[in-house]
Amino acid sequence: MSLVEDKPGTVRGAIPSLATDIDAMMLEIGRRARAAAAVLAQTSSDRKAAALTAAAAAIRAGSNQILDANAEDVAAGHDKGLRDSLIDRLLLDADRIEGVAAGLEAIAELPDPVGLTMAEWERPNGLKFERRRVPLGVIGIIYESRPNVTADAGGLCLKAGNASILRGGSESYHSSAAIVAAMHQGLRAAGLPEDAIQAVPTTDRAAVGKLLTMPQYVDVIVPRGGRSLIERVQNESRVPVFAHLDGLCHVYIDAGADRDKAVAIAVNAKMRRTSVCGAAETLLVDRAVAADLLAPIAEALRAAGCALRGDAEARALFADMEPASVEDWGTEYLDAILSIAVVDGVAGAIAHINHHGSHHTDTIVTEDTATAETFLNEVDSAIVLHNASTQFADGGEFGFGAEIGISTGRMHARGPVGAEQLTSFKYLVRGTGQTRP
């Protein structure tokens, strides 16, 4: 049973008595999610996989409807004056829809984390202990303009036995609704409740506020979006949060870097897709090789269409860039813009990243393994790479099938949040009549 939006802040159909009460509407969504979570917690791996596979088939079969819905969202985005990089995040085409469907099939094929025994031991008194993975329960996901997150989030939650409440951005409202409709077909085909994946049926921001204050129904909140969204969620939530802060990602070119690798990695990290959270926003170059390597890297970036902003030393070595301001070192552009700074070796790079970064994803380019290990160990980020593009900050590239987001916090989950990270555990203790003295 679905909730249908009449106008922002109202619903009709399933719960008409709640027509103007967003609080009551959200509580009803939460109640249904909790009931669905109880079913999913006992659902077999095969049935969950069947639902995901059927959802993928429904997305392919409904691609025209999804594209029509997306065209409506994209047109509205243009009318609102969204910049090109944000339109790119919003846009779906045949290839991206195929990617969404294939992503669900990849999730279906992943090992099921639920029910796995994490550890077993026996005490001297004969009690046998087992720590076993269990679903988290109900997960609320709040995200902005990327409609593919709808499928990734709903699919991963389902795989891990969790019900999901999805609140996508207003920019992708119609696209996300069409994707959820297809996923409901998959749930029905597998005999699972549609309430396992629910989309908040309004763009009214009051619904977000209520979602954050429903600990009786929601077990964790996963926000994906800009700093203002994350700060609001962290400030207002009465539910635990998997934090996903800005993707202030860095590429550091060390004195021991191979020139060709340095150019290729820097260009790919920035320009493969500028709108993703793993896109590099700052390039750091070791002063020892800046005179040799900074210019060819900058030339390749400019040739790829990237605007550059640099500190004084960088601009002295490559004139075709604007001066960088203090704010640039802390800005997630999500666009074809990159800041460049010259630093004193790996220590200078680490200090810059740990001070200005968002603890998301950073990489070093070097053939010096000792320097690489220093960087890997001392950069305080969720993902730290050596000789690889920051654009590998993606759950699919980690073998997780997909991700809900990149957690930059330190509690429970860090880095790509895949199916395994969407589980908790409980202890099973088996005895033979023991009593405690």
Image (tube, rainbow, N blue to C red):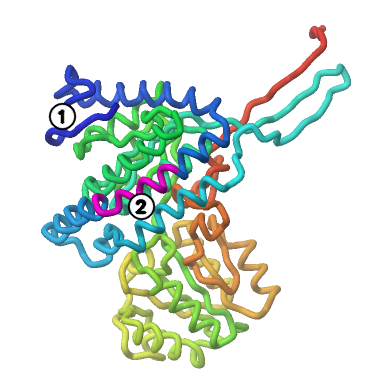
Q: Residue at 42%, 21% (x, y): give it.
A: 35
- In terms of sequence position, does the residue under pointer 2 or pointer 1 come before the other? 1
Q: What is the number of the mark on residue 340?
A: none
Q: Residues within 10 Å of mark 1 (few under 14, many from 20)?
A: many
13 vs 241: above or below: above
- Going by the image, does 2 lie left or right of 109? left
162 or 214: nearer the eye? Answer: 162
Q: Magenta segment range?
A: 54-65
Whether residue 126 appears in this view of the structure is yes
268 vs 122: above or below: below
Indicate the secondary structure of the residue bearing disc 1.
loop
Mark 1 residue type: Thr
141 or 172: nearer the eye? Answer: 172
Residue identified by numbered label 2: 60
Query: Considering the image in quadrants, where does the N terminus appear?
Result: top left
Q: Residue at 36%, 37% (x, y): give it.
A: 185
Indicate the secondary structure of the residue bearing disc 2.
helix
Whether residue 234 appears in this view of the structure is no
> Can you give x and y, in whole percent of width and height, for residue 195 in the image?
37, 28
Mark 2 residue type: Arg
Q: Residue at 54%, 69% (x, y): give it.
A: 363
Residue identified by numbered label 1: 10
